[in-house]
Image (tube, helix red, strand yellow):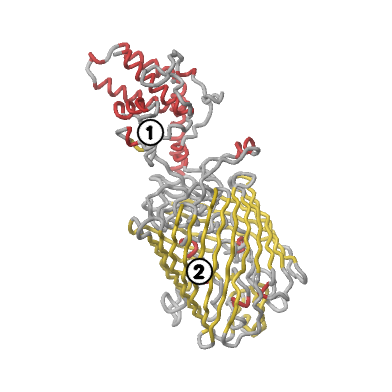
């Protein structure tokens, strides 16, 4: 009996250790069940890593431990960013990518120096549907409050609930992984009877019950582990054997059996002592966090962006500016499947200038369309500057350095394949509908494209921000997703006056069907129907035009976007409500983990009620090269035409129909897992769709801090 027990325990040690270091045969083998097993009397503590490294002092790097720490940063990008194969955006859930910088959940800053000269580790491509939402119902929050979520693209492993993605708020990502107890070795999908360790695993699983598998039903026998992890596994088996011994009769347990057990325990007493100390330390830290935490249900995530920008071109009057924008997100989950998001913004980007001659609306003084309007109560000529080249760092930054709540949303699943979002948000449609532009669409985190146009199809901007409901459904499978939403004009939804409110003011309706044909290729069709009261039409969010020519946004001088500049309300003189139907198509293809290409084409048919109809076009291709030269870096290119007017009825001003090309290039450099520096340029040909206007070049240097 003693020899038999010794053989079993030694085999346990050899199998676990041999699998842990990834060798083809156990480092120590006594039982004849292991093929080609040389006999040896080496004690377990003399076993060494085949790479020649002493694993005793290394930190554990198991997926279970990474899951326990819930990640630590792009990606994002996962931002970003950023790059394991995320759950279907909105369909099966991500976060953060959404999508991309570092989804390993580890702080690898120290390792980067050693890896600079090496080829980055290959990663699975982010799926084309990874333009995930930042407000995700299947966030899969742990039972205890989330300690940290910094990876670019969220990679939680929730149940498939449409419209859900791991929390993709920049700088945040959740990674959860838990081990599942199994009762038969046949439950391990990657263990075959022909494997050299099959009989040993079968004994450990079915006889001793001290081996567990991963949630996906695999054992991952080739993954390396440290001596600490080995000690923890051995301790579990020894405890199980102790239980079996105590449950046995005296005749079945001899002094030799007990001595064998004690010998193995002594071999790893140092590691077990250290492990117990670490557990005690973690328990103390958890207790301290629980005693001092802000909330048991809420976590704070955010980003801060500093940007220096200027415009260059013939006759340019813009000065070099320093602009900043901060975003704080309070993310709450009450059940683990729902998400309540409160998003606060502050910044110093302008909405225009009343000091210029003539006064202009927009973030830069660029070529535009002049029309008569009111500034305060005075009628004046106002220039609506073209919104081409609006920087993503300027989005939601027109708050006059005051902190404003711009998004409030509650998301929850109503079934395994349906998710509902109630939102009052600055720009909710592209947060919940798959934009199919991973890496460049960063959910306003400051880690993606440098322009708003480069982030997503402008069709989402025409519907604008507002208050309403968004539904995501995967009716048949996760490969097919339907998104539908209704948003009332967010600026007047709380006003009970006639022509305002939830159903009697402006609105936007969106319907989108996304088909994830393969893991790396997706297409989508989008339809929008929008009604804009006078002064609300255009590719804008609550007063800020974010893309498109001034000719298109003003319908050739027949409607002026209402905004407030320096405390003065700027508005059109003549009422001009507009109703618009828009149709778009978009795609994403990722032939490898190092390259992604996306594109879109949209056409719009605005009707200036009582005056005439028009047509607006926009299209683009975007190219992303993630992890270029270094993990977390990103080279991005955008080539396309921002929305421009091709024809218009009514009484339009004379306008040209020259194609206003937008050419953009940027390179995001990861300084640390939470700091990124991004230089970039935007070249605008034919600004305001007129070749007679000189080309404009917008240059920016953006620094992003994620926390």
Q: Position of residue 551 (x, y in %)?
A: 62, 78
The disc label shown at residue 191, or none: 1
Q: Nearer the viewer, residue 491 or 225?
A: 225
The answer to whether residue 259 is above or below residue 444 is above
Q: Which residue is mark 2?
A: 584
The disc label shown at residue 34, or none: none
Residue 378 appears in the figure: no
Q: Position of residue 311 (x, y in %)?
A: 72, 65
Q: Position of residue 640 (x, y in %)?
A: 62, 66
Q: Nearer the viewer, residue 37 or 101?
A: 37
**Contact (Cβ within 8 Å) of mark 2 with mark 1:** no
Mark pair 2, 1: CA separation: 47 Å
Dot 1 surroundings within 10 Å: few (below 14), some, or many (20 or more)? some
Q: Identify the mark nearer the N-term, 2 or 1.
A: 1
The answer to whether residue 552 is above or below residue 81 is below
Residue 122 appears in the figure: yes
The answer to whether residue 408 is above or below residue 95 is below
410 to the left or right of 151 = left
Q: Secondary structure at mark 1?
A: loop
Q: Nearer the viewer, residue 669 or 14?
A: 14
Q: Position of residue 567 (x, y in %)?
A: 61, 74
Look at the image and tell me in which quarter the N terminus lies: top left
**How many discs mark residues in the rendered view?**
2
């Amino acid at each position: 009996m003693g020899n038999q027990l010794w053989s079993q325990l030694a085999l346990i040690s050899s199998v676990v250790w041999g699998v842990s270091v990834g060798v083809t045969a156990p480092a120590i083998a006594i039982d004849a069940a292991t093929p080609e097993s040389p006999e040896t009397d080496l004690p377990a503590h003399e076993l060494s890593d085949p790479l020649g490294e002493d694993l005793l002092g290394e930190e554990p790097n198991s997926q279970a431990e990474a899951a326990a720490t819930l990640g630590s940063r792009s990606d994002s990008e996962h931002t970003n960013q950023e790059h394991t194969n995320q759950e279907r955006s909105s369909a099966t859930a991500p976060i953060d990518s959404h999508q991309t910088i570092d989804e390993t959940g580890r702080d690898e800053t120290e390792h980067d120096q050693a890896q600079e000269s090496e080829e980055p580790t290959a990663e699975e491509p982010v799926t084309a549907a990874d333009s995930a939402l930042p407000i995700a119902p299947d966030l899969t929050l742990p039972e205890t409050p989330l300690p940290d979520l910094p990876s670019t693209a969220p990679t939680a492993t929730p149940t498939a609930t449409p419209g859900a993605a791991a929390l993709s708020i920049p700088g945040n990502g959740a990674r959860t992984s838990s081990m599942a107890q199994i009762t038969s070795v046949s439950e391990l999908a990657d263990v075959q009877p022909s494997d050299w360790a099959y009989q040993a695993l079968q004994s450990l699983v079915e006889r001793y019950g001290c081996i567990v598998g991963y949630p996906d039903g695999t054992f991952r026998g080739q993954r390396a582990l440290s001596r600490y992890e080995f000690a923890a596994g051995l301790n579990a088996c020894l405890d199980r054997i102790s239980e079996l011994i105590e449950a046995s009769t005296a005749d079945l347990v001899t002094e030799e059996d007990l001595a064998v057990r004690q010998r193995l325990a002594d071999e790893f007493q140092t590691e077990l002592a250290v492990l117990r100390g670490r557990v005690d330390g973690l328990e103390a830290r958890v207790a301290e966090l629980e005693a001092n935490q802000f909330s048991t249900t809420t976590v704070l995530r955010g980003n801060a962006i500093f940007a220096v920008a200027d415009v260059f071109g013939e006759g340019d009057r813009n000065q070099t500016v320093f602009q900043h924008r901060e975003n704080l997100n309070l993310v709450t989950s009450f059940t683990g499947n729902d998400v309540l998001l409160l998003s606060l913004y502050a910044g110093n980007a302008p909405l225009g200038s009343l000091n210029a001659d003539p006064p202009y609306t927009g973030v830069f003084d660029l070529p535009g369309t002049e029309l008569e309007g009111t500034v305060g109560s005075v009628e004046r000529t106002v220039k609506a500057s073209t919104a081409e080249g609006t920087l993503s760092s300027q989005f939601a930054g027109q708050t006059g350095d005051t902190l404003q709540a711009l998004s409030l949303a509650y998301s929850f699943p109503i079934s395994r394949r349906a998710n509902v979002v109630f939102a009052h948000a600055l720009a909710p449609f592209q947060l919940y509908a798959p934009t199919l532009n991973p890496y460049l669409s960063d959910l306003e985190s400051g880690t993606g494209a440098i322009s708003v146009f480069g982030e997503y199809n402008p069709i989402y901007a025409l519907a604008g921000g507002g208050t309403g409901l968004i539904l995501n459904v995967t009716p048949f499978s996760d490969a097919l997703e339907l998104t539908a939403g209704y948003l009332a004009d967010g600026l007047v939804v709380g006003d009970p006056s006639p022509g305002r409110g939830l159903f009697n003011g402006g609105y936007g309706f969106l319907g989108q069907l996304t088909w994830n044909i393969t893991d790396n290729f997706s297409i989508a069709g989008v339809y929008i129907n929008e009604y804009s009261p006078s002064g609300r039409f255009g590719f804008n969010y609550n007063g800020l035009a974010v893309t498109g020519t001034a000719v298109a946004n003003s319908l050739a001088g027949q409607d002026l976007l209402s905004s407030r500049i320096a405390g003065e309300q700027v508005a059109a003189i003549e009422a001009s409500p507009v109703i618009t139907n828009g149709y778009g198509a978009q795609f994403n293809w990722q032939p490898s983990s190092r390259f992604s290409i996306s594109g879109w084409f949209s056409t719009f048919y605005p009707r200036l009620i009582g005056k005439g109809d028009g047509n607006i076009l926009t299209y683009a291709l975007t190219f992303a090269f993630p992890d270029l030269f270094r993990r977390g870096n990103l080279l991005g290119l955008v080539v396309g035409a921002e929305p421009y007017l091709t024809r218009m009825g009514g009484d339009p001003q004379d306008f040209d129909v020259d194609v206003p090309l937008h050419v953009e290039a940027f390179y995001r450099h990861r300084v640390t897992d939470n700091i990124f520096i991004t230089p970039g340029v935007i070249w605008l040909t034919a600004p305001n769709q007129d070749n007679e206007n000189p080309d404009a070049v917008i240059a920016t240097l953006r620094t992003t801090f994620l926390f």
